[in-house]
Image (cartoon, grey):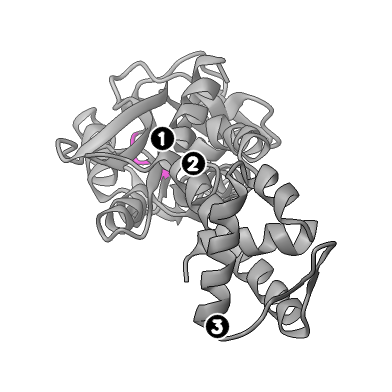
Amino acid sequence: MELTHLKYFIAVAEELHFGRAALRLNIAQPPLSQQIKRLEDELDLKLFKRTSRKVNLTEAGQVFYEEAKSVVGRAEGAKKRMEDLALGRRGSLSIGFNSPAMQRVLAKALKRHMELFPDVELRLIELGSHKQFEALDKGELDIALLRPYGRELLEYDVQLLFQDEYIAVLPKEHRLSSKNELHLADFSSDSLVMFSKEINPELYDDLLEIIRAAGASPTIVQEAASKNTMLALVEAGVGWGLVPKESMKKSAYDVEFIPIKDVLPKIDICAVTTSGTKPKVLQDFLKTVDDIKKAGV
């Protein structure tokens, strides 16, 4: 018994006329009658009562009609779901991200992508860059939006989303808060608030080395897991810090932002995926992110 035979049967059961059913199926009537006869022989049941005037379902035919509709419906539904999956209209993505990526690109990309592909499930996981790479390598993430500083990227596909630079943030009452620009050496041994080392160990060490090489000897008094936590700690007078220049926009914290003259690492936020052929659902999301980037978000 094939799916085609069930479709033939359903057509006759709904039309109750072999000629109309044949027209509906776009086949000749004799082959249709032969297929129904073979189906009845296979089931060893009469599915239709035939007279010269009309065709009706038998009791067994009525039961089989309900079953046949269910089977064909499930099969067509499965086919549609597989087509949607192949075309990227259905599926799921695990997306790793950090706070800058969410604020600058990801939030708008998510909104647009959910409008374009409402049946694609987007699973969001906030992690530091180091943890995102670990999850990407284990296959736990499909895409990571992160800062790849200090990481060899030859085995990945990388798309730069945006670039920022560091700026110093100081408490209002800090002795340097009235300056228009600063050198790292100006901070001498002032208390420093750093981001948590586990977010990016290489960057953490390199920044400290640059600060010390410039002539400052900071005392790290606190590590912050997020930019907002760092700004709050600086506002409270715990110490000074280095944050992306973007932090100046719409800042809710009563602090001073002052440019640094020393050369510091750029802040590159990228979309990173493992290299190789990508499923359509991931290709479409990468395009959405790229469109948001090109729009100058």
Mark sitting earlier along the chain (1/2)? 2
Using the numbered discs, state the Cα–Cα distance from disc 2 to disc 3 in whole angstroms: 40 Å
**Hey, what amino acid is under mark 3?**
Leu
Query: Which residue is labeled 1 in the image?
Result: 283
Q: Is residue 31 magenta?
A: no
The residue depicted at 66 percent of the width and 37 percent of the height is 111
**Hey, what amino acid is under mark 1?**
Gln
Q: Position of residue 31 (x, y in %)?
A: 53, 54
Residue 131 located left or right of residue 41 = left
Q: Position of residue 16 (x, y in %)?
A: 79, 61
Q: Does the residue at mark 1 contact the one at mark 2 (Cβ under 8 Å)? A: yes
Q: Position of residue 66 (x, y in %)?
A: 72, 74
Q: Is residue 191 magenta?
A: yes
**Which region of the structure is painted magenta?**
188-192
Query: Which residue is labeled 3 in the image?
Result: 43
Query: Which residue is labeled 2 in the image?
Result: 88
Using the numbered discs, state the Cα–Cα distance from disc 1 to disc 2 in whole angstroms: 8 Å
